[in-house]
Image (cartoon, rainbow, N blue to C red):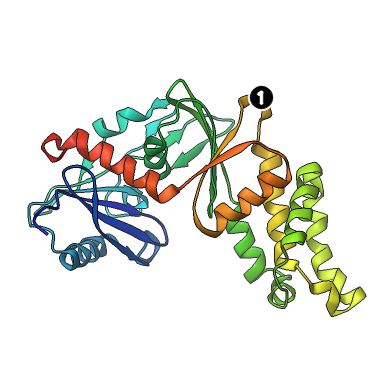
């Protein structure tokens, strides 16, 4: 593919997505891999990347731009954080080159919130936000660690991280509830009811959790119905109660896949105004914009 002008990579903790793009930003080829940062040592990143680049037939001189956990301290090479509040269009000025490589490979920095009250960090989400190109309002990015971002006049003003996805996984697989939850089916109605209850009474979530253990002991196997849905609904409902600020306007749900559907259903049931945007497309747009800033000849 001689018309490939840049390789763009969103390299997360668990997985990575790679796109080959033309001079106009059109996606020519895509690859996905489960070789996320958590599964690699620093010397393993280059072979993984080179294998994917070879598969799509990119020329030797094709530059590479990456975002996400690849730039963490435990990743390929650390890209120091920018400090919030910050203008997202400053990201292109702060990319760092990966040393010792035959091709031009660069990593986009994350953003840190360096406050005593609410210290926080993000990597990868900043590129999605750039691709979203939203000057003001609340943006929600669900995930293992969900991000709630407040944009003001084109700047990332502040953000919060909520460990909703990780808590769900830990409770489902490693807690006293794991065997109980393994025997439950998903029920959409139970998810909605749980999300509504947790949003109205987020302080009850810890006592609600043990009810998943007690109910089948007291009322038999029929009480197992919808256990995973209830757990998910309680966690997501409590997250929304903690982070949503009605005075800051409507929400943009920046997500895709199953998580997008769950948050979509929760916001709808709670009568919270929102719009929904595909996260993968936002990542592409953000990477393309920064690549165009760095390598103008590739526009």
Report which residue position mark 1 lands on.
Answer: 247
Which element is circle 1 on?
helix
Within-10-Å neighbours for mark 1: few <14, some 14–19, many 20+: few
Give the residue drawn at x 56%, y 55%: 259
Name the one closer to the observer, 194 or 26.
26
Q: Is residue 47 left or right of residue 273?
A: left
Tell me the residue at 85%/72% (across/down): 223
Q: State the image coordinates of residue 183 (x, y, percent, origin top left).
A: 72, 78
The answer to which of 195 and 243 lies nearer the viewer is 195
Instruction: Choose top left, top right, bottom left or bottom right for residue 241.
Output: top right
51 is higher (above) or lower (below) than 117: below
Residue 50 in the image, given as x and y percentages of width and height = 18, 63
Residue at the right extreme, as displayed:
218
Residue 9, image x, y percentages: 29, 53
Position of 240 with respect to 123 (left or right) is right
Q: Quadrant of the N terminus?
A: bottom left
Residue at 67% x, 42% y is 240
> Which residue is farthest top?
153
Q: Is residue 85 visible?
A: no
Residue 282: image location, x then y, percent? 39, 44
Q: Is residue 46 left or right of residue 176?
A: left
Q: Is residue 213 above or below residue 274?
A: below
- Location of residue 262 with respect to 135 vertically, above or below: below
> Which quadrant of the view contains residue 102?
bottom left
265 vs 225, left or right, is: left
């Amino acid at each position: 593919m001689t018309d490939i002008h840049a390789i763009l990579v969103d390299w997360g903790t668990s997985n990575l997505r790679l796109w080959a793009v033309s001079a106009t930003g059109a996606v020519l080829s895509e690859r996905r891999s489960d070789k996320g940062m958590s599964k690699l040592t620093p010397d393993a990143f280059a072979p993984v990347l080179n294998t994917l680049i070879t598969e799509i037939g990119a020329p030797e001189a094709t530059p590479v731009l990456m975002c996400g956990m690849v730039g963490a301290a435990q990743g390929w090479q650390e890209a120091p954080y920018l400090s919030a509040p910050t203008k997202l269009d400053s990201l292109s000025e702060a990319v760092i080159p990966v040393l010792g490589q035959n091709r031009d490979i660069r990593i986009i920095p994350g953003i840190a919130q360096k406050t005593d009250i609410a210290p926080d960090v993000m990597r990868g989400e900043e590129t999605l936000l750039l691709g979203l190109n939203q000057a003001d309002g609340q943006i929600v990015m669900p995930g293992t660690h969900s991000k709630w971002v407040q944009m003001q006049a084109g700047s990332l003003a502040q953000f919060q991280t909520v460990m909703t996805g990780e808590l769900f996984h830990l409770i489902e697989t490693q807690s006293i509830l794991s065997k109980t939850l393994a025997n439950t089916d998903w029920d959409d109605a139970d998810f909605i009811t749980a999300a509504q209850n947790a949003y109205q009474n987020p302080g009850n979530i810890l006592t609600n959790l043990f009810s998943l253990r007690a109910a089948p002991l007291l009322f038999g196997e029929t009480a197992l119905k919808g256990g995973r849905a209830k757990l998910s609904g309680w966690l997501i409902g409590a997250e929304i109660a903690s982070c949503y600020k009605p005075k800051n306007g409507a929400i943009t749900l920046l997500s895709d896949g199953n998580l997008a559907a769950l948050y979509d259903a929760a916001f709808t049931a709670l009568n919270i105004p929102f719009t929904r945007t595909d996260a993968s497309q936002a990542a592409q747009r953000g990477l393309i914009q920064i690549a165009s800033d760095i390598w103008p000849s590739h526009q």
